[in-house]
Amino acid sequence: MTARRHRARRPSPPGPDSREGRHMIAPALPISPDDSATLWALAARTGDAEAAERFVRALHRDVRRYVTSLGVDPQSADDLTQDTFLRALGSLHRFEGRSSARSWLLTIARRAVVDSFRYTATRPRLSDTDDWQAAAERAQPHNLPGFDDGIALADLLADLPDERREAFVLTQLLGVPYAEAALFSNCPIGTVRSRVARARISLIESLRDAEQHTRRDTAA
């Protein structure tokens, strides 16, 4: 009788839920920063300390910038940013990836700021911080000329109503999609677009006024 030949079975590649699989897949796929942060958040749910660290590192700057935009002073911004991540890490088991990790985290940040304002019974006000200057340099608003002339974006944003400022910061500075900004702000997407458009008009008008004052001062 002819002996049967037994083919050696190749080992199966690690699955996406295994520790090896996560570390093989995450760096290799050409994915967006938002998707990457979401993958790290999902991996961190299983207790992966490295994934949790990468999740925090990926979104720390955006959270602090958003917290600052709501009128928090620099020291409180650091504290509230830390509080946001503590809340998020404690709630990761409930995060299912239906929205991006960034949108989910900004919702937590907003709640942390509101809780802080309620506790201190103070009204939010915009703080002119280095974060705003850095945000203006790294993410200039589209079709809004003149910000390279030395006029601080924070000064112009300070005059906007809170809802318009928040919509503008989310979509134009942080790059949150309009659909996610609408869910985040609990309003229709058309309302977000309207707020951004009105904020843009107000900023252009304020920019023109500032330039006129600058020219008059120079001429004098």
Image (cartoon, grey):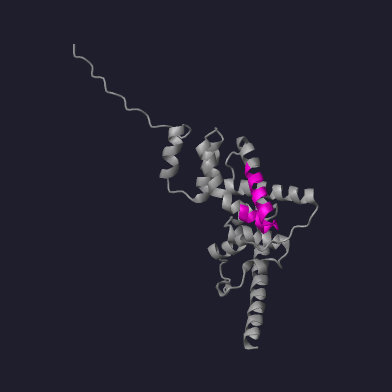
Q: Is residue 11 above or below residue 94?
A: above
Using the image as rendered, state which of residue 47 and residue 82 is in the foreground.
82
Residue pictured at 61% horizontal, 49% vertical: 103
> Which residues lie in the magenta part?
64-85
Using the image as rendered, state which of residue 216 and residue 107 is in the foreground.
216
Residue pictured at 70% horizontal, 47% vertical: 112
Locate residue 59, reporting x and y percent. Answer: 56, 49
* Quadrant that contains the C terminus: bottom right
Residue pictured at 53% horizontal, 46% vertical: 37
Q: On the picture, is 158 further left or further right than 137?
A: right
For residue 84, say whether it is visible: yes
SS majority, magenta: helix
Locate residue 157, reporting x and y percent. Answer: 67, 66
Q: On the picture, is 192 further left or further right than 25?
A: right
* Magenta segment includes 78: yes
Using the image as rendered, state which of residue 183 and residue 190 is in the foreground.
183
Locate residue 91, reporting x and y percent. Answer: 64, 37
Locate residue 74, reporting x and y percent. Answer: 66, 56
* Magenta segment includes 68: yes
Using the image as rendered, state which of residue 63 and residue 106 is in the foreground.
63
Q: Is residue 51 above or below residue 6?
A: below
* Quadrant that contains the N terminus: top left
